[in-house]
Image (cartoon, rainbow, N blue to C red):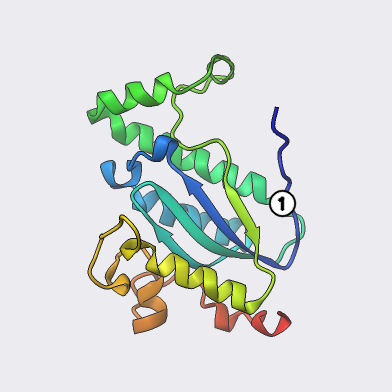
Amino acid sequence: MATRTIHQISDSTWFITFTCYGWLPLFDITSSHDLVYNWFKIIKTKYGIHICGFVIMPNHVHLLMYMKNENINLNNVIGNGKRFIAYEIVKRLQHFPSVLVQLANACTAQEKSKGQLHKVFEPSFDAKLVYNYNFFQQKLNYIHHNPVNGKWNLCNEFSDYEHSSASYYLDENQRHQGIITDYRELGWVESF
């Protein structure tokens, strides 16, 4: 049995990735980008967590989140967010019965015994502590270029991708105002 890593460090920035089960493009199938935005707003209001960069891809999410409070457990924040988003995705999948069957069949007997009916996300998530400003910039650039890298051709220019913070930083586009927190205004960059 794999051991679970506990992520609990205060006054820190994390590069987070979580993925839809089997890399299925569930965010696109269900037009569920709004669910991720709502979750961003909830964790900002409830926990004071700041989203400093993000991209919502068809089947995964990358984000840079700043946590000041030492009493927040990152595992719980991400786990609860995935659960909240998963319930709503399943509701939106009612018109896609074959996908629902696939997600239902993915649940193990143990998961079913605990009441889980569908596996919407991969069970774990990736969390890397951002340890310096160069690493932060590397991850922010990776996030912003994700829609046009590799197999992805989601737009011509990376800053045109609607579900990313790239246009906020490059063009001062206010599309994600209230969701994104400009890392330059947090005052923690100097601490690296």
Q: Is residue 134 left or right of residue 10?
A: left
Residue 172 seen in the current view: no
What residue is rendered at 66% in x and 51% in y? 74
Q: Is residue 133 left or right of residue 71?
A: left
Identify whether 28 is placed above or below 55: above
What residue is rendered at 58% in x and 40% in y? 124
What residue is rendered at 56% in x and 77% in y? 183
Viewer-side residue, 144 vs 71: 144
Viewer-side residue, 156 vs 186: 156
What residue is rendered at 41% in x and 61% in y? 55
Identify whether 39 is placed above or below 95: below
Viewer-side residue, 148 vs 76: 148
Quadrant for the C terminus in the image: bottom right
**Looking at the picture, how far across and down is residue 125, in whole percent?**
57, 46
Quadrant for the N terminus in the image: top right
Amino acid type indicated by mark 1: His
Residue 28 seen in the current view: yes
Q: Mark 1 highlights which residue?
A: 7
Quadrant in the rendering for residue 95:
top left
Tag 1 secondary structure = loop
Counting every numbered tag in the picture gives: 1
Residue furthest toward the front? Answer: 150
**Looking at the picture, how far across and down is residue 97, in whole percent?**
26, 24
**Looking at the picture, how far across and down is residue 130, in whole percent?**
65, 67
**Looking at the picture, how far across and down is residue 39, in whole percent?**
48, 52
Q: Is residue 66 left or right of residue 139?
A: right
How crowded is the residue under tag 1: few (<14 C-alpha within 10 Å), some, or many (20+)?
some
